[in-house]
Amino acid sequence: MKKTMRPTYSQLSAGVVAVAIAATGIGIPAFGADLSQPVKLAQGSLIGQCRAVNKKVSVYKQASTTGAIVSTLNAENKVTLADNGSNGFIGISSPVSGYVQVVNLKPCSGNPPTGSTCRRVIQREGLVIRKEASPDSASVGGVAYLERVDLTTTPATSKKGPDGRNWVQIAKPAAGWVSNGFPGSSNLGLCP
């Protein structure tokens, strides 16, 4: 009689983690890695990308399940990523700002396509377009709330300023750089 082997809990857990990594594009540190350092991602920045929730989930104020819950999202709700994730959590900027567990996300289906360079301004005051990635750089224009901008590349060409602010290079409505906020927040969302 042939005996059927069932997968162990650790084998199932490893499979779930592998699916989560593949679905979200987010890396996790190897065993023994320094968890105080941000996770390095091969494909570049995830900020502004779309993900869908794979089940009903809580959105936390901090990147921890012990933090305050700011909202609950239902399965298939779409979110906009606000950072590159770390220690199993990733920041989101819409439909609400906060943090969700990475394993609860999957790729978005439908529009916009993953390679889209279109973004819209979700900062209510609008954004100043700067010549360089600095708040002290000359202004070359502005973009109002909910107006569209075109990134120069996808994923976005981005720089981190000395004050910790994230800057994104855009081609339209004027060539330059706009502030995409500080880690954990975002001034740009995906185009509808």
Image: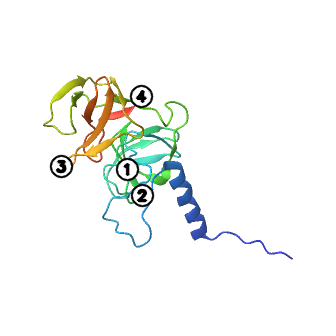
Camera-side residue: 94 or 121? 121
Image coordinates of residue 186 in percent, x first then y, are: 30, 39
Between disc 4 and disc 3, the foreground one is 3
Residue 191's tag is 4
Residue 88's tag is 2
The reply to whether callout 1 and callout 4 are in contact (CB within 8 Å) is no
Q: SS for tag 1?
A: loop
Residue kind at label 3, given as amino acid type: Pro
Image coordinates of residue 127 in percent, x first then y, are: 23, 29
Instruction: Pick whichever of labels 3 and 2 is earlier in the sequence.
Output: 2
Between disc 1 and disc 3, the foreground one is 3
Distance from disc 4 to disc 3, alpha carbons, whole Å, reads 29 Å
Q: SS for tag 4?
A: loop
Instruction: Pick whichever of labels 1 and 3 is earlier in the sequence.
Output: 1
Residue kind at label 4, given as amino acid type: Cys
Camera-side residue: 133 or 25? 133
